[in-house]
Amino acid sequence: MRFYDIFNGDADGLCALHQLRLAEPRDAELVTGVKRDIELLARVEPARGDEIAVFDVSLETNRPHLMRMLDAGVRCRYFDHHFAAAIPRHPLLDAHIDTSSSVCTSLIVDRYLRGRYRAWAVVAAFGDNLREAALAAAAGLRLTPDELDVLRELGECLNYNAYGESLEDLHLHPAELYRRLRPYADPLEFARQSPEFEMLRRAYREDMERARALPLRDATSGCVVAFMPEEAWSRRASGAFANELSQRHAGRAVALLVRSGKGYRVSLRAPRNTASGIDVVAREFESGSGRTAAAGIHFLPEHDVDRLLELLERTYPGTTPVSGN
């Protein structure tokens, strides 16, 4: 029998896997990648009797691969918060899927584990731009304000590390980053002792300083838009910068368009006061997917930029132009 742990390389996927393996230690083949590398089940060929665990990866995107495995006699536990459509009913599938806008995969695992290792779920929620959910989960942990701030920064740095066009853009391979987390039941201990955290913290600050220097363009009271150059730092900072803009402009949608050849890779955020509908916008485009509050378009051709901006303005109407950062 072989085991596979399949997880999104961002803070939520990392922390979800880490929580479960702290509670249920197991050696498994790790399958992961950059944040938008989501068709991960296509990479494995388990045999009858093998087991897979999946974290923070869209079931809808991976449905054909999942059904192939289940029908071949592979047992699966599936934790996720992305749009899933109909969840398959199969005796070998144990699905824990909640698409609520205030939930991330690590909070689903936290619920499954009845609060064991909850501090790691707090880290993930901060990393996934769910500040209110993170604070709610942390309420019973008796953390000082400084400790809570460390968990926030750790979540942001873990999430930042997953953004890139390819693994070469990242500072650490997500599988290696998970191995560095693995010895630590307490994220505060990891933050105190790990050189990786300090390295990511410095890199994050440098990339974000560049991002903050960019002008906001084509922005209205309903939508904030920024265009970013075709650079590795842009790809790394795009998710964190989109989250920061969504916090700074809580009543507006956010669109970050990172140049990619003859088009763009797009990060989208719904207004925080509604936290809904942005996945519908993303799915209007061929490579769009995501959640109700945060979504993306893997590749947006140049000729579709105006259509995206018009759709955002119709979905989140605004009339007062804004400028600057």
Image (cartoon, rainbow, N blue to C red):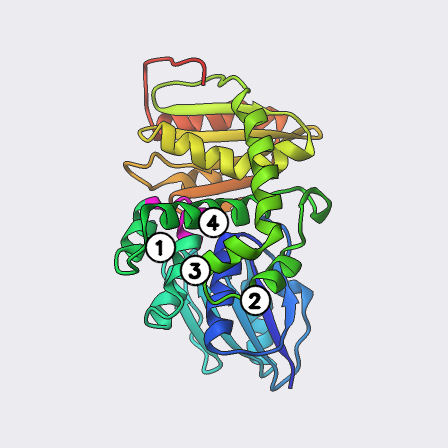
Q: Earlier in the sequence, mark 4 or mark 2?
A: 4
Classify 10 Å Cα crowding around label 2: few (below 14), some (14-19), many (20 and above): some
Q: Amino acid at mark 3?
A: Trp
* Residue range highlighted in magenta: 124-131
Residue at 49% from the left image edge and 73% from the top image edge: 22
Q: Secondary structure under badge 1?
A: loop
* Side of 98 relative to 78 (left or right): left
Residue at image mark 1: 103
Q: Earlier in the sequence, mark 1 or mark 3?
A: 1
Residue at image mark 4: 155
Residue at 44% from the left image edge and 33% from the top image edge: 244
* Side of 144 relative to 200 (left or right): left
Q: Secondary structure under badge 4?
A: helix
Q: Amino acid at mark 4?
A: Gly
Q: Split into 4 quadrants, where in the image is the N terminus?
A: bottom right
Q: Of tags 1 and 2, which is closer to the observer?
A: 2
Up the image or down, 280 lies above or below 47; here it is above
Q: Earlier in the sequence, mark 1 or mark 2?
A: 1
* Side of 148 relative to 234 (left or right): left
Up the image or down, 58 lies above or below 232; here it is below
Q: Which mark is residue 120?
A: 3
**Is residue 19 among what the camera can see?**
yes
